[in-house]
Image: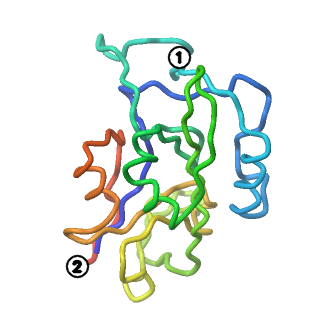
Amino acid sequence: MRVFELRGGGNGYMTFVAKNEIDLYQDRFADMKNYSETMSKEPPNLILGSATHNQKKYKGKPLKIADIGYLVAGNVIVNERVRETIGDYLKQFGDLIPINVEGNTWYSYVVTNVLDGITDIQKSVLTRSGRLKIPAFDIQKLPRHPQIFKTKETGLLQIFFTETETEGLRSLINIHGIDAGDMKLVWESK
């Protein structure tokens, strides 16, 4: 069993920036369901941008627009093709909320599947201040079947997914040729 972090986008990708004043940051919400409901009622209007405002290139190459892009910590945005091809799989673990991006419909993917107590703090890498930097997981507590999830130990600010050799989100992304930007392997059972 392997655990990856889904980040969406990366250095060579455009980002999605709020055009209006809505607060996209989920840390003000008590739980992910509340965040999802609020996003449904008050969806933000987004524009494409970059870390340095409207930069269109990275290291001389044009920035790409990922099918699964970064929105804010713990939240990614997906395009219509992703919703059509793997939307049913994604909805098992969260909500797809329509968002306007420069006149096109994208979807904020809010992962509501929060798994508690699966992080092995003793084997995890911590920062000097004691915050979780690189999580390790308890193999006995991880779900047997691939899932997309968040953990309370990471403050709900990271999206993880489990994968076997033939099943899981990465497999679906590869089958459908989806550009998901950076996905980082964070843990592997031995």
**Helix, strand or loop for disc 2:** loop
Amino acid on which the number 2 mark rests in the picture: Lys
The quadrant in which the C terminus is found is bottom left
Q: Which residue is found at the position 37% from the left and 50% from the top? A: 85
Which residue appears farthest toward the left when viewing the image?
Answer: 165
**Helix, strand or loop for disc 1:** loop
Between 122 and 61, the one lying in front of the other is 61
Which quadrant holds residue 68?
A: top left
Q: Would you call the spot at circle 2 few (<14 residues within 10 Å), some (14-19), or many (20 or more)? A: few
Q: Position of residue 151 (x, y in %)?
A: 56, 68
Q: Position of residue 178 (x, y in %)?
A: 31, 42
Amino acid on which the number 1 mark rests in the picture: Thr
Which quadrant holds residue 170?
A: bottom left
Label whose residue precedes the other's in the sequence (2 or 1): 1
On screen, 127 above or below 46?
Answer: below
Between 149 and 131, the one lying in front of the other is 149
Give the residue number, with chain letter if any, for mark 2.
190
Q: Which residue is found at the position 78% from the left and 50% from the top? A: 38
- Give how far apart the Cα atoms at labels 2 and 1 are: 41 Å
Which quadrant holds residue 114?
A: bottom right
The quadrant in which the N terminus is found is bottom left
Q: Position of residue 122 (x, y in %)?
A: 46, 78
Give the residue number, with chain letter if any, for mark 1.
52
Between 137 and 87, the one lying in front of the other is 87
On screen, 138 above or below 187?
Answer: below
